[in-house]
Amino acid sequence: MSKYKVAVIQAAPVLFNLEATLDKVEELVGKVRDAKLILFPEAFVSAYPRGLSFGTVVGSRKEEGRALWQKYWESSIAEGDASCERLGEIARRAKSFLVIGVNEKDGISGTLYCSMFYFGPDGEFLGKHRKIKPTAQERVIWGEDDGSTLSSFDTSIGKMGGLICWENYMPLARMAMYQKGIQVYLAPTADNRDGWQQTMRHIALEGRCFVLGSNQFVTRDMYPADLPGGSDLADQPDVMANGGSIIVDPLGNVLAGPLWGEEGILTAEIDLNQIIQSKLDFDPIGHYHRPDIFEFKVKNQPEISQIN
């Protein structure tokens, strides 16, 4: 299949409420028609905790921060649990590939990871990517992956994979994905600055791939009123994440978006033949690679998963 429709969701979860967020995922997916691939933002299940400190400063932690951490943990999901299976069922009903940003809890270690979960149109859990480098204060709440989930999937709609938020500023991480032959590059994010749009267009041009960028639209009044540590939000603006979701083709042309200031769904038809055409004059792993000069090696790499 070379031509098909993709969809990018821009919305907020029901913050810190797992079941209500899964209900919203189901509702939003139900609004998409005939898309073969649906992308949700970073940490959609069940919050990107913008503005919250979790009661931490260097050298000390507050009890209200620990209570907030427990609430955050309880609104997160684990690979293979009932919530994960429900996401698979949502994908199966839509007959679409579903890729969604989640807070993934490791039931053995207790660590949380910022992850992307991939589901096939048959509802099967295909795999995941865990963020390899949380940014700044994110390092308090999320662990780092070892590179073993720099995943890609060779599917009936092309080779897909991607990176989360500021991982996309890591040149070597991008190159690791390009070397896998990524055709559809997925970039869920929490970055709603204007400059992020240029990053998405740059990656499309550099990687000669379609790029889907998905962000949340979140207002301060969406946070629960009784949230532990919620006093941190007093100085935050009314609109805390303004969106900016976008779909870009392999020559950097914007196919849909950017969408600002509201929840919504972006759709576009993509044609994988454009990827071949775009490589007439540039290919980062082909005739612009120069392996006679440069040597590039990535550790702990998973195999490319073959998906029917």
Image (tube, rainbow, N blue to C red):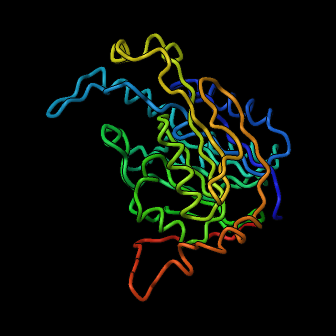
Query: In the visual, does 24 lie left or right of 225?
Result: right
Report whether residue 86 is seen: no
Task: Identify the image quadrant of residue 265.
Answer: top right
Image coords of residue 199 (percent x, y): 50, 49
Q: Position of residue 282 (x, y in %)?
A: 58, 72
Determine the residue located farthest toward the bottom in the rendered image: 292
In the image as oriented, which residue stretches furthest toward the right? 34
Using the rendered view, name the quadrant where residue 68 is placed: top left
Which quadrant of the figure contains the N terminus? bottom right
Residue drawn at x 44%, y 48% as measured from the top left: 106
Q: Is residue 71 left or right of residue 93?
A: left
Q: Residue furthest left?
A: 59
Is 189 rendered above or below residue 36? above
Image quadrant for the C terminus? bottom right
Give the camera-side residue of 199 and 185.
Answer: 199
Q: Is residue 225 left or right of residue 180?
A: left
Q: Is residue 7 above or below residue 11?
A: below
